[in-house]
Amino acid sequence: MTVPHPASPSLADQIEDLLPQTQCTKCGYSGCRPYAEAIAAGSADINQCPPGGAQGIVRLAGLLGKKVIPLNPVNGLERPRSVAYIDESLCIGCTLCIQACPVDAIVGAAKQMHTVVTSLCTGCDLCVAPCPVDCIVMYPVSGDATGWDAWSQMDADEARARHDFRTQRLRREAQANDARLAAKAVAKMQEVTQEVPVTPDEQAEKERKRAIIAAAMERARAKAAASAATQTEPPAPNTPKKDA
């Protein structure tokens, strides 16, 4: 289950609750939450979500008191729900599809065969383009049903929970990696500082090393500060991608 919103959910929270949580980015934003925030801010319209389809637009229009409008074809078409399938005989184990999946629906390891857990796949198709050997195809699984007729609120809640868990995991991994690199830089700086140069050339080399390490530490500090800032600022929209 997804983590419930606070007692007084914001408008963005209410909008997000009405989105299908496929995280496909077809709306032009990096996920359902950024799209919800953009709608709440008035910088995005309610007709940019192909997975939600016509019924999704009706849901959003009802919440916001807006007129129901057609799905914007720039963002794609309303289609039957699909799931990804990997031709395991062609897979080279590059892990690019695993990195692209927003809900951790693909399992595998580097240089090992990958496979899709179809019950977890949201049909976002973000894994297709990165595959260097074109071994991933999308298969329709909902017959003629499209939009919310091919999806359920339970599906959306579970997809959002997996997406949120993945986001938190990646953040923790990045923070742990940054901490390891920072500790390594500090240790290296201490090592260089303790060097006792004898000649002018050795002194110059010591200063060169110190400057390189100091610059690396400053870049790491700036990166950490930028990362903290992006967690509190609304993300900029992506260029809307057309449905294939």
Image: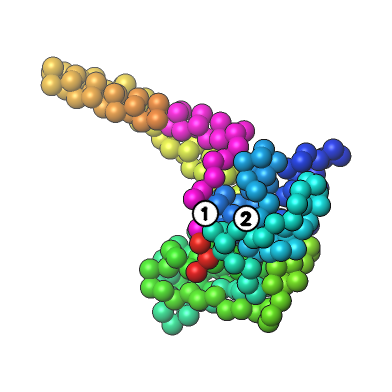
The reply to whether residue 196 is in sight is yes
Q: Amino acid at mark 2?
A: Gln
Of callouts 1 and 2, the N-terminal one: 2
Q: Which segment is the magenta one?
A: 220-241
In the rendered view, does 51 fall on the left or right side of 131?
right
* The N terminus - image quarter: bottom right
Give the residue drawn at x 53%, y 35%. 227
222 falls in the magenta region? yes
Mark drawn on residue 240: 1
Q: Nearer the viewer, residue 198 or 134?
A: 134
| Label 1: how many Cα within 10 Å (few below 14, some 14–19, many 20+) | some
In the rendered view, does 188 fall on the left or right side of 56?
left
Give the residue drawn at x 57%, y 44%. 171
**Place of residue 100 in the rendered image (x, y in percent of width and height, measured from the top left):** 51, 59
Q: Amino acid at mark 1?
A: Pro
Q: Nearer the viewer, residue 28 or 131?
A: 28
Asked if residue 73 is positioned above or below residue 173 in the image, the reply reads: below
118 falls in the magenta region? no
Whether tag 1 and tag 2 are in contact, CB under 8 A, the answer is yes
Which residue has dot 2 on it?
A: 48
Quarter of the view holding residue 202: top left
Please tell me whether mark 1 sits on a helix, a strand or a loop.
loop
